[in-house]
Amino acid sequence: MNFRSDNEAPVNERILAAMVAANKGFEQSYGYDSYTEKLIEKMQQLFGCWCDVIPLTTGTAANSLATALTTPPYASMYCSDNSHLHNDECGAPEFFSAGAKLIGVAGTEGKIDLELLDKTLSLTGVHGEHECLPAAISLTQSTEAGTLYSLDEIKQAHKIKQKYQLYLHMDGSRIANAVAAMNCSIADMTWKNGVDLLSFGATKNGAMVAEALIIFNPKIGTEIKRRRKRAGHLISKMRFVSAQLLAYLEDNLWLQLATHANQQATTIFQALQDRHEFIYPVQANEVFLRLSVEDIDRLKAKGFEFHIWPGSRDIIRLVCSHMTAEKDVQSLIRELLK
């Protein structure tokens, strides 16, 4: 009974079938295939605007290329000190940008404290050329804590971006869970509220290996193709990535899969909220619970798989996926109500 990671879930059958269907005949390489052409059209329809679409295979590549496009080697990007970008990319954003600095900003519930961000930015410039030039802000949606930035908070980040003439990036490895949870359009969550570029994730939500960097601001996309090639992420048989994303978007499959995952997390919260301590609000597909060591050991003995959160002995993370079975959720609930 796997609650360890949505990365561990199998590939959705419709996406797998789309890859098999794409394996018939010959197609041009390096993104000049018909599938990638259709994907660009589909993404522009989804967002309701012009955007450049860069199919990739990892979220690290998307985030790192986004950093490189917005943040020169002498500049800095501001992100949550709890974010994947800051803690779990092994220096890739700094490497791809040839030395840009990531500055972690404190906050609560996995989110940047936007007032603190504004204050921090207001103090830059004191040391002139001795300090890194602020260049970009990155928001993670949903966050590493499974929480969400509201549309008002994204709008506030946009105002800060404008105030200091920065770029705004969104790490959307779980963007589907965020859109499904907030019941808004992905356009409202991104470019309509000032997001310049989005790391669009699909792998955690049913794809095999498919992400995309979506660039809304044409001013920052002129270098992307050569940066992608230089980084080793220009995929020769790109049709197999694009085919996954096409199937993912078809008939709103991406939202159906995310809704299922979110609902399972909500079910856990609703059943246990009066009996156990939840570390963060349950807003998407992740649940953070404080349990006794005895409860944790009992769950493991019963076959439940999950992560004990680093730095603690009594906080566990449960991640629900598009394949999380309702019977497994109910089994977990029964164990924790004993």
Image: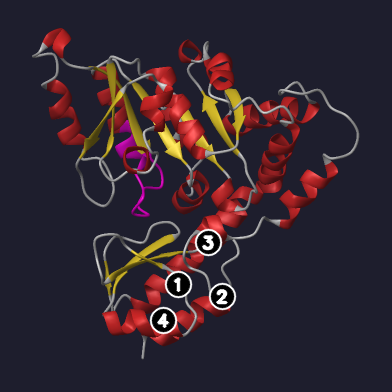
Residue 8 location (% of width, % of height): 56, 59
Work out whether mark 3 precedes mark 2 in sequence or the reverse, and give the earlier one.
Answer: 3
Question: What span is in magenta?
Answer: 140-155
Residue at numbered disc 3: 261
The reply to whether callout 1 and callout 3 are in contact (CB within 8 Å) is: no
Q: Which dot, 1 or 4, sits closer to the camera?
A: 4
Work out whether mark 4 precedes mark 2 in sequence or the reverse, and give the earlier one.
Answer: 4
Is 149 covered by the magenta stretch?
Answer: yes
Residue at numbered disc 1: 267
Residue at numbered disc 2: 326
The reply to whether callout 1 and callout 2 are in contact (CB within 8 Å) is: yes
Give SS at disc 3.
helix
Work out whether mark 1 precedes mark 2 in sequence or the reverse, and give the earlier one.
Answer: 1
Query: Dot 1: few (<14), some (14–19), or many (≥20) neighbours within 10 Å?
Result: some
Q: What residue is rendered at 58% in x and 16% in y?
A: 225
**Mark-to-mark CA distance, 1 and 4:** 18 Å
Q: What residue is rendered at 20% in x and 40% in y?
A: 113
Q: Is residue 191 left or right of residue 308?
A: right
Q: Amino acid at mark 3?
A: Ala
